[in-house]
Amino acid sequence: MEPKEQADAGEITDTNQTRSVGRGCNRILWLAVSTLVITGVTWGVTQLLSNVNTHDVETLTDFDAIDSKDKLGGGQYLIPSPIEDVGAPPLRADTCNGRYQWAHSKSGIDVSSTLSRVTITAEKDHQVQIIGARRVPVGEQKSPAVGSVLTCPGAGAPPVRHAYINLDTGDMAYFDGESDQPQQELNIPVESGKTEVLDIQAQTEQYDWAYKIELVLRVDGEEVVETINDGKPFRTTAPTNAKQYRWIDDGWPWRDARFRTTAADTGYPCHAAERLYASNPAGIERGDRSTTDAASEFSKCPQHDSGR
């Protein structure tokens, strides 16, 4: 073969090699693109599946709107200001009801107990179980708040289904509404397409707590934790660092830790004690503490104060 022919043959060989390499690059590019497409589709399907709504959790925190409030108690608030700046309660009435919005508009803090109602709905074709509730502290544990505690008459009633959380210890107990004794565990099934309601009562006797409440669910066999109240914290304080008042005879007489009417304040306490004593003479005969205490305190009032 002549040199020219050899050179031409070499060029042909090089061209074939170049074409072969080019076809190999195309295959690699095609595989890479295919892999990216498959990965994208897989990710999209995963996102769609993960965004499927399996359940819904809603929280009601307005004490006055929860119909079990009279059975579980609450409705007392601490206002971080002197009592003379508080003003009259709604309806000017001595009651635990109707004060939630009013007190919270004055930066009020729930005293001793916070009640919330959680509504859990299982979407169609999904199964949900309520299996736990717990408090999650926010910030440092604090001494009870200082201010004016607005008290009201307590009430007792038959048990109601609820989860009770001891804020001071973190313990949780579940009451099924049939017995006044706690059950061994919290396990409320929510059937597909159905709704269940659980009241949660958080209480403290020692501190001022800021905290969130987590609801533990089992959704289609997997544990799911939901922070109720859209993740917003609650606040509940013990009343032991604040003066306590109760709306009596159109005023806020001072009351001690046992909620006894006293005459040891200015304004209307003596008048309130007189009215309470005079309006319930039978209470003296029965030995009612509130009435006998009022009579005792009224006896300490100066005579000229009784007409105020």
Image (cartoon, rainbow, N blue to C red):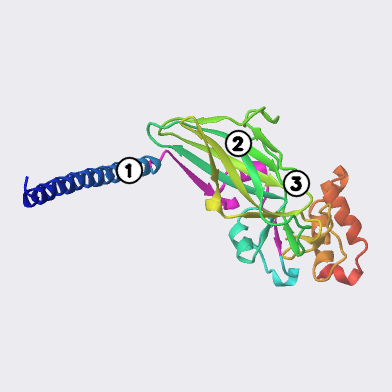
**For this rendering, which residue is in front, 39 or 185?**
39
Mark 3 surroundings: few (<14), some (14-19) or many (≥20) residues within 10 A: some
Q: Give 265 or 76, whichever is nearer the viewer.
A: 76
The residue at 49%/39% (across/down) is: 120
Which residue is under mark 1?
39
SS at badge 3: loop
Q: Earlier in the sequence, mark 1 or mark 3?
A: 1
Residue at the disc numbered 2 = 132
Q: Residues within 10 Å of mark 2 (few under 14, many from 20)?
A: some
Mark 3 residue type: Asp
On the image, the x and y values in percent for residue 156 come to 70, 40
Quadrant of the frame with the N terminus: top left
Find the distance from the CA under tag 1 to the CA under tag 3: 50 Å
Q: Which mark is residue 168?
A: 3
Alpha carbon of mark 1 to alpha carbon of mark 2: how far? 38 Å
> What element does badge 1 sit on?
helix
**71 drawn magenta:** yes
Residue range (magenta)? 52-79
Residue sitting at 84 percent across and 57 percent down?
Answer: 256
Residue 273 is left or right of residue 64, and the answer is right
x, y (%) of residue 215?
Answer: 57, 41
